[in-house]
């Protein structure tokens, strides 16, 4: 291939590699190429599980929902774990579960992972995935979150709605550490999945 046919540029900010072959521009995230994990992060009820499942289906990748897996492994609901063992035990379990999947992904198993709303805000979890795939923040407005939560009682940190808005604000700068942000102002799952598939990472 001649030099005229192949032109490579890199973008440190988005950690992408852009290359042109015979006039066609290809973009690829080096992180995703090295370790094929897509991690969806964001607040409770922002759609992480539903969107991750559909995205995994479209990509033909495996789908992992961290919370469901924790519930299955421990044969307890998240609420029960919070109530009987405390939040700190839940966070330890969450990190262990995440670490196990990061290792599998690193070994070459492509997966879309839906994290629990508090997982990405824990520094050790963020450090685990920062260089092990691509993170996408589903940034959903608080009003939509409240509507979706309705009178849901399965999320221990959502029972006090006043506190919930504080947690929402506190966490925003931490979610913003994700590689990409998708604004979720719709309940249309396919539309959000399309936006993710259009990110310059595949
Ligand atoms: C939590 C979010 C929940 C679950 C747990 C704690 C949080 O997951 O992990 O209740 O700290 O925001 P979802 O985001 O799937 O509701």
Image: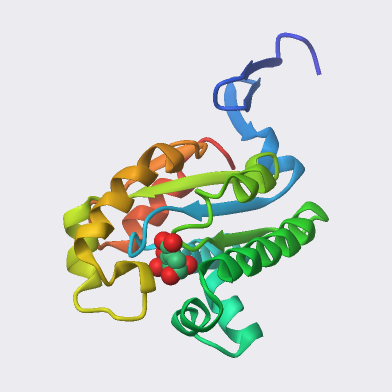
Question: Where is residue 197 shown, x and y percent of the image?
Answer: 48, 48
Q: Quadrant of residue 4?
A: top right
Say whether residue 3 is visible: yes
199, 101: nearer the viewer: 101
Q: Which residue is drawn at 65% across and 60% down?
A: 95
Question: Where is residue 87 shown, x and y percent of the image?
Answer: 51, 68
Question: Where is residue 109 shown, x and y percent of the image?
Answer: 75, 60
How many marks on residues? 0
**Residue 102 left/right relative to 40:** right
For ligand 1, the image quadrant comes to bottom left
Q: Quadrant of the N terminus?
A: top right
Q: Is residue 188 above or below residue 153?
A: above
Question: Where is residue 131 shown, x and y percent of the image?
Answer: 69, 39
Q: Residue at x 47, y 53 (%)?
A: 41
Colour basis: rainbow
Say whether residue 140 is visible: no
Q: In this view, does 144 lie above or below 122?
A: below
**Residue 62 left/right relative to 151:** right
Q: Is residue 197 above or below residue 155?
A: above
**Residue 138 left/right relative to 106:** left
Residue lying at the far top in this picture: please name it: 4
Q: Quadrant of the C terminus?
A: top right
Residue lying at the far bottom in this picture: please name it: 75
Q: Residue at x 55, y 64 (%)?
A: 56
**Residue 128 left/right relative to 137:** right
158, 201: nearer the viewer: 158
């Amino acid at each position: 291939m001649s030099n005229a046919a192949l032109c490579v540029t890199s973008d440190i900010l988005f950690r992408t590699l852009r290359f042109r072959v015979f006039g066609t521009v290809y973009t690829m995230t080096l992180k995703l190429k090295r370790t094929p994990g897509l991690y969806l992060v964001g607040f409770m009820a922002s759609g992480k599980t539903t969107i991750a499942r559909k995205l995994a289906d479209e990509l033909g990748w495996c789908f992992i929902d961290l919370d469901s897996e924790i519930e299955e492994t421990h044969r307890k609901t998240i609420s029960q774990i919070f109530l009987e063992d405390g939040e700190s035990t839940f966070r330890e379990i969450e990190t262990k579960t995440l670490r196990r999947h990061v290792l599998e992904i690193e070994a070459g198993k492509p997966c879309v992972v839906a994290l629990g709303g508090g997982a990405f805000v824990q520094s050790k979890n963020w450090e685990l995935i920062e260089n092990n795939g691509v993170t996408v923040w589903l940034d959903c407005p608080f009003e939509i979150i409240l509507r979706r939560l309705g009178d849901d009682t399965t999320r221990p940190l959502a029972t006090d709605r006043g506190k919930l808005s504080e947690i929402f604000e506190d966490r925003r700068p931490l979610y913003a550490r994700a590689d990409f942000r998708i604004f979720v102002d719709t309940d249309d799952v396919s539309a959000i999945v399309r936006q993710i598939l259009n990110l310059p990472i595949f």
